[in-house]
Image (spheres, rainbow, N blue to C red):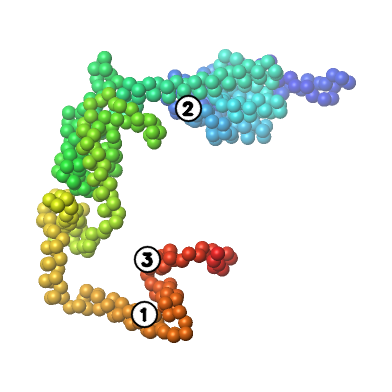
Amino acid sequence: MDNVIERPFPGGQIGRPELKIVPLKFCLYARKSTESEERQVLSIDSQIKEMLQLAEREGLEIVAMKRESHSAKEAGQRPVFNEIVDEMKTGKFNAILTWAPDRISRNAGDLGKVIDLMDAGVLMEIRTYSQSFRNNPNEKFLLMILGSQAKLENDNRGVNVKRGLRTRCEMGLRPGSTLTGYLNERRMDRKCEVIIDPDRGPVIRKMFEKVGYEKWSGPRLYHWLRFELIFQTQGKKPLSLGNMYRILSNPFYHGIFEYPRNSGNWYQGKHEPLVPKELFEKVQAQLKRDNIQRESHEFAFTKLMTCGKCGSCISAEEKYKQRKDGTTARYVYYGCGRTRDKQCKGNTYLREEELVEQLLKIIDQIDINQINVQMKFEDELKRHNKFQRTVLGLSDPDAKHEEINIRTYAKYILKEGTNEEKRELMGCFKSNFKVNNGAVTIE
């Protein structure tokens, strides 16, 4: 009988143990990896259909059915398979019905678990579509060979894929999806190459020119793409701000590419560059300067004023002009941020110097108490007087006057100073501070 196992059991005649008949209870296990290399494997539903037909023909008892979509390349990473192992140890079932041995494992770790279960007498049989494996040396050895072969094929496939990608790179063809500004070559004799997108390529080139030559900032360029050109990618979606910066920083557009990313392996592309290398380097310098200025400077009047027409917050924009003497002049312009009305034109750009001049004229017409300055001024005056009394007013002719002032000033800052002042002060101490069980110590 194929659905039972005869297992030696003590209790028969002396020297001849009884053969206990153990019924086989199968767990049907269907697995399909989501990875591309297993596209040719039957789907989970097809595996289940075939196995159920096999069970009906051979009278197999199926007590559980498990399905899983997970790769078997790494050991211990399949939750359903781990669940099968745990339930098998409790005696819920003692056999597995699956499509092929490689559905059980493609790695040595999980294969070792299966063999250990067989050695322990917990797993009595593995039945596949074309063969079965029971707890005897020959069939376990064959199962291990088939499992090892599946692992070998899996490892070789990874090596072959990497070799193919490396060969493609050496040919000047970048792996991966086509970047914005390019299209896949559709001619049969050159199907692997890319060509410049006649619609989007000129816009990408113009992006580099505006940043490199005209010194446009990132926000200004994004506004130009989004609201003036209404530029869209191949997917008919607006170009995001992050994607815009990635395009401007990608050397693929001047002819070279790195693969894999951050590997240091650079290749000369076979595609036609959209911009010259000199322009690309100008753009990188401008982006770096733009980033430094955004990190180190905050505009004086942003978020404090709104547009009188649409109610949007006033935003600021920097522009730089090269002087004849070689220095660079910086100008700040304020205008409507268009957060509420993308098409608002009710707030023309205004230079910061002009804005300040107008504020100076208006401030004389405002009661000083209404702009919440009086209290702040009085607090600062009190602090100044306290500093004079507690620091500058101390003197001791018998002591080192300079040392007393420094230490007294340090205590004053720790009590009354701002967070920035306290951090600067702590950075001046040469001792190292430690906190142990709530106690501060130095070394």
- Check disc 3 and report the residue beneath it: 420
**How far is disc 1 from disc 2 in space, using C-alphas?**
72 Å
Q: Position of residue 103 (x, y in %)?
A: 54, 23
Q: Position of residue 151 (x, y in %)?
A: 54, 23
Q: Position of residue 237 (x, y in %)?
A: 24, 38
- Check disc 1 and report the residue beneath it: 387
Kind of residue at badge 1: Phe
Q: Quadrant of residue 242?
A: top left
**What SS does tag 1 mark?**
helix
Which corner quadrant holds the N terminus? Answer: top right
Residue 118, numbered circle: none
Q: Quadrant of residue 186?
A: top left
Q: Residue at x 25, y 78 (%)?
A: 374
Residue 33, numbered circle: 2
Q: Residue at x 30, y 27 (%)?
A: 268
Kind of residue at badge 2: Ser
Q: Nearer the viewer, mark 3 or mark 2?
A: 3
Q: Residue at x 14, y 52 (%)?
A: 325
Q: Considering only order in the chain, which callout, 2 or 3, is on the residue closer to the N terminus?
A: 2
Q: Position of residue 333 (x, y in %)?
A: 16, 56
**How far is disc 3 from disc 2 in space, using C-alphas?**
55 Å
**How far is disc 3 from disc 1 in space, using C-alphas?**
18 Å
Is residue 189 toward the left or the right of residue 56 in the image?
left
Q: Considering only order in the chain, which callout, 2 or 1, is on the residue closer to the N terminus?
A: 2
